[in-house]
Image (cartoon, rainbow, N blue to C red):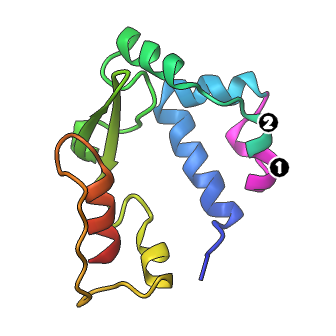
Amino acid sequence: MYRRISDGEFAAFLSTAYSGAPAVRRLLDEAGLRPNELGPPEAVLPRLRVTRKEELSAQQQEDPPFGGWVSGGMSSLRRVFVSPGPIYNVEGTRPDDWGAAEAFRAAGFGPGALVLHTFTYHLSPAAFMIEAGVL
């Protein structure tokens, strides 16, 4: 049931992020990558360094509110969550923005299913991930 992102979708995603999110631009520049020269995800992702939680928190404090990681303004967001750090996590406006639906469908959950989940809806995205993925 897993659907691999196409090379074109991957390139379009990174191109949008490169032009709209300064932190993504820095990350790609550090790796010597340009949006018009990208290959498939399996060739690009290993070249990108991991951004640690502490670094992300510092970036968000230096460049509020999201440290340069979000392209698009606040109108492109449905919700903002706060994780310890603090780190601000965002949810976009697309249906199932977390990409959880595919996993839940594979497990047999979907519209009309009776689902009891016990995640809180208080400043954490987990409950919204479950909700978006099952509905």
**What secondary structure is marked by label 2?**
helix
In the displayed structure, 65 sits above or below 102; it is above
Residue type, numbered disc 2:
Arg
Magenta stretch: give its range. Answer: 32-44
Residue drawn where x is 26% and y is 45% of the image: 77
The verdict on residue 39 being magenta is yes
**Left of 134 or right of it: where is 49?**
right
Q: Which residue type carries mark 1?
A: Ala
Q: Is residue 33 magenta?
A: yes
- Depicted 97 relative to depicted 81: above or below: below
SS at mark 1?
A: helix
* Residue 95 can be seen in this image: no
Q: Does residue 133 appear in the picture of this structure?
A: yes
- Picture coordinates of residue 35 (x, y %)? 68, 41
Q: Residue at x 45, y 15 (%)?
A: 59
Q: Quadrant of the C terminus?
A: bottom left
Q: Dividing the image into 4 quarters, which one contains the N terminus? A: bottom right
> 103 or 12: which is nearer to us?
103
Where, by quadrant of the figure, is residue 119 drawn? bottom left
The answer to whether marks 1 and 2 mark residues whose Cβ atoms lie closer than 8 Å is yes
Point 37% across, 84% down: residue:
109
- For residue 47, the mark is 2
| Residue 89 picture location, percent across and down | 35, 37
State the separation of the CA atoms marked 1 and 2: 7 Å
Residue 114 position within the rendered picture, expressed as x and y whole percent measured from the top left: 22, 85
Dividing the picture into quarters, in which one does residue 33 lie?
A: top right
Residue 78 at x, y = what percent? 22, 49
Residues 120 and 96: in front is 120
Q: For the point 52% across and 40% down, which residue is it?
A: 17
Q: Residue furthest left?
A: 122
Q: Quadrant of residue 128?
A: bottom left
- For residue 43, the mark is 1
